[in-house]
Image (tube, rainbow, N blue to C red):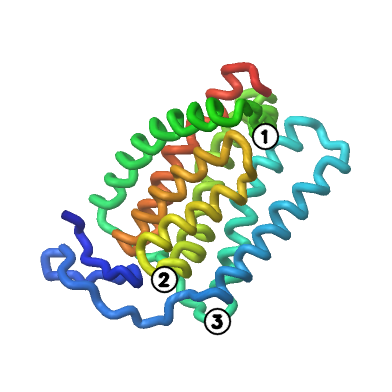
């Protein structure tokens, strides 16, 4: 039983009773994002993320500095894409799922993140078994964290906190919200596929697909991006320390 009753068309903001619990959802006061917001958000994300990323290798940076900048780039690009989408027409954070949510939903996010982390491992193994491709484009994250304690902390925070914040604001707050206009199944699955494809067809694809499905479903049910951000933090946080410990940097 969920705390919010959400229609299949749109996450709704719950009314609060005097005891602070949720009853029936209140009508949204703002129009929900549509295709223009989604298109603008993805264009800005691509320009900032892939455009800057493609130029970094030409600067001759120290590998640790290069890795740290690259590790932060997805989060920065996601925030830029989200900001552009919000400024386009609606200019209401609430319409994009940036709204308060109960502690119960945040705890659900922690639990869902742990489950998604385990499912990710299985999904990656299946991908490798089918394709034979076990290479990863993410060794650059380990390079960013391999310069000592400070670089390890920074790379972990960039990938484990900044990236989830930026990517969830864009891919759940904007893209999933746009696609949920066309029904819950289509919205959840298609937004997850877009999220996964933006990571490329490689070993990261199945992991991103799992994250996208869980994040979009939590957005749909809770009406807020915060549970999905919590899932993503739990999902990403161990990545850099594990890769550095494995000597991948």
Marks 3 and 1 close (CB-CB < 8 Å): no
User: Residue 211: horizontal and vertical position, in percent?
Assistant: 45, 45
Q: Please give left or right for residue 21 compared with residue 48 in the image.
A: left
Query: Which is more N-terminal, label 3 or label 2?
Result: 3
Q: Which residue is mark 1?
A: 137
Q: Is residue 8 left or right of residue 203?
A: left
Question: Which mark is nearer the camera, 2 or 3?
Answer: 2
Q: Secondary structure at mark 1?
A: loop
What residue does disc 2 label? 182
Q: CA distance from mark 3 to mark 1?
A: 36 Å
Quarter of the picture containing the N terminus is: bottom left
Q: Secondary structure at mark 3?
A: loop
Q: Is residue 10 above or below residue 134?
A: below
Dot 3 alpha-carbon crowd within 10 angstroms: few under 14, some 14 to 19, many 20 or more: few
Q: Within 10 Å of the Cα at label 1, are there few (<14), some (14-19), or many (20+) other Cα atoms?
A: few
Residue under the image location 41 percent in, 67 percent down: 180
Q: Position of residue 218 (x, y in %)?
A: 34, 54
Q: For the residues carrying marks 1 and 2, which lies nearer the camera in this image?
A: 2
Which residue is the site of mark 3?
89
């Amino acid at each position: 039983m969920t705390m919010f009753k959400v229609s299949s068309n749109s996450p709704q903001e719950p009314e609060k009773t005097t005891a602070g619990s949720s009853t029936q959802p209140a009508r949204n006061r703002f129009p929900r994002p549509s295709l223009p917001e989604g298109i603008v958000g993805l264009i800005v994300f691509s320009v900032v993320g892939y455009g800057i990323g493609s130029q970094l290798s030409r600067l001759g940076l120290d590998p640790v500095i290069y890795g740290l900048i690259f590790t932060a780039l997805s989060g920065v690009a996601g925030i830029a894409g989200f900001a552009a989408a919000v400024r386009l027409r609606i200019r209401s954070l609430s319409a994009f799922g940036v709204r308060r949510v109960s502690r119960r939903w945040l705890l659900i996010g922690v639990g869902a993140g742990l489950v998604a982390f385990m499912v990710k491992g299985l999904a990656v193994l299946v991908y490798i078994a089918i394709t034979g491709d076990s290479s990863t484009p993410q060794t650059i994250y380990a390079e960013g964290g391999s310069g000592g304690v400070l670089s390890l902390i920074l790379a972990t925070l960039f990938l484990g906190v900044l990236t989830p914040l930026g990517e969830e604001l864009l891919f759940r707050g904007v893209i999933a919200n746009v696609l949920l206009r066309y029904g819950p199944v289509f919205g959840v699955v298609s937004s997850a596929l877009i999220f996964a494809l933006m990571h490329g067809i490689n070993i990261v694809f199945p992991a991103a697909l799992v994250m996208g499905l869980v994040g979009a479903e939590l957005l749909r049910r809770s009406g807020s991006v915060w549970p999905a951000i919590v899932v993503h933090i739990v999902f990403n946080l161990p990545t850099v320390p594990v890769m550095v410990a494995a000597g991948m940097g």
